[in-house]
Amino acid sequence: MASSTICGRHHPYLVYDQLEFDVPVGSVGDCYDRYLVRLEEMRQSVRILHQCLDRLPGGPENESKEPINVPDYKVVLPPKEKVLTRMEELIHQFILVTQGVNAPPGEVYFAAENPKGQLVLHSQQGRWHATPAENPLAVLRESQRCSLLLPGHMVGDTVAILGSLDFVMGECDR
């Protein structure tokens, strides 16, 4: 939630400007402080989810059975039962999964929250793609912090320090 709430707070989109939440900030910067911030991020995420659930048509349980998604299967994935029994829905699902949603003609720039930072999507000529230059891998940002955090600590502290960062180990080879 860290960067996502900052994005939602300072550059609100969708309903972020109508939601109440706090952006957790640590004061010390050590492993325990990052742990406490992470816990508060989860609490604030749950707070945001509860507010969003309350705004659903028919309430959190959708007692009125109103549709929540758009019934256009060219934009939203169709229900699995229809995919397994109808050819048109199968085709729509295949196109959505393999090609994505068609964007409007021209150029479109959209930034959205992501657990590892801000996800930037860019569309040219009707196709969406993540822009690598504007969305560097999170592991690069996190690994650059190691040179500041590790000096002066014991080797055994390395595990706790690295564990308090937000690494995605599968990206380390890039």
Image: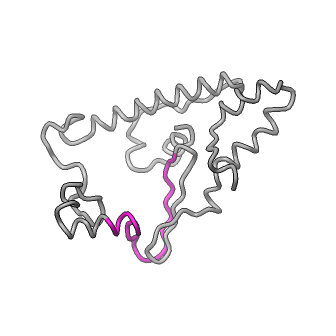
**Could you tell me which residue is drawn at 81 percent across and 27 percent down?**
155
In-front residue for pair 130/88 = 88
- Specify the farthest residue to the front: 84
User: Picture coordinates of residue 23 (x, y %)?
Assistant: 54, 33
The C terminus is located in which quarter?
Answer: bottom right
Kindly indicate the quadrant of the structure image that contains residue 29.
top right
Q: Is residue 162 above or below residue 93?
A: above
Q: Is residue 105 magenta?
A: yes
Kindly indicate the quadrant of the structure image that contains residue 163.
top right
Left or right for 141, reference 153: left
**Could you tell me which residue is drawn at 87 percent across and 27 percent down?**
152
- Specify the farthest residue to the left: 64
Q: Is residue 169 above or below residue 31?
A: below
**Could you tell me which residue is drawn at 57 percent across and 47 percent down?**
117
Left or right for 6, reference 143: left
**Could you tell me which residue is drawn at 37 percent across and 66 percent down?**
101
Q: Is residue 16 above or below residue 106?
A: above
In-front residue for pair 89/112 = 89
- Specify the farthest residue to the right: 152
Q: How many marks?
A: 0
User: Picture coordinates of residue 150 (x, y %)?
Assistant: 81, 32
Q: Is residue 131 magenta?
A: no
User: Picture coordinates of residue 92 (x, y %)?
Assistant: 28, 68
Kindly indicate the quadrant of the structure image that contains residue 90.
bottom left
The stretch of residues the image draws in magenta is: 94-114
User: Picture coordinates of residue 10 (x, y %)?
Assistant: 53, 44
Q: Is residue 44 above or below residue 139?
A: above
In-front residue for pair 71/106 = 71
In-front residue for pair 21/138 = 138
Coloration mode: one colour
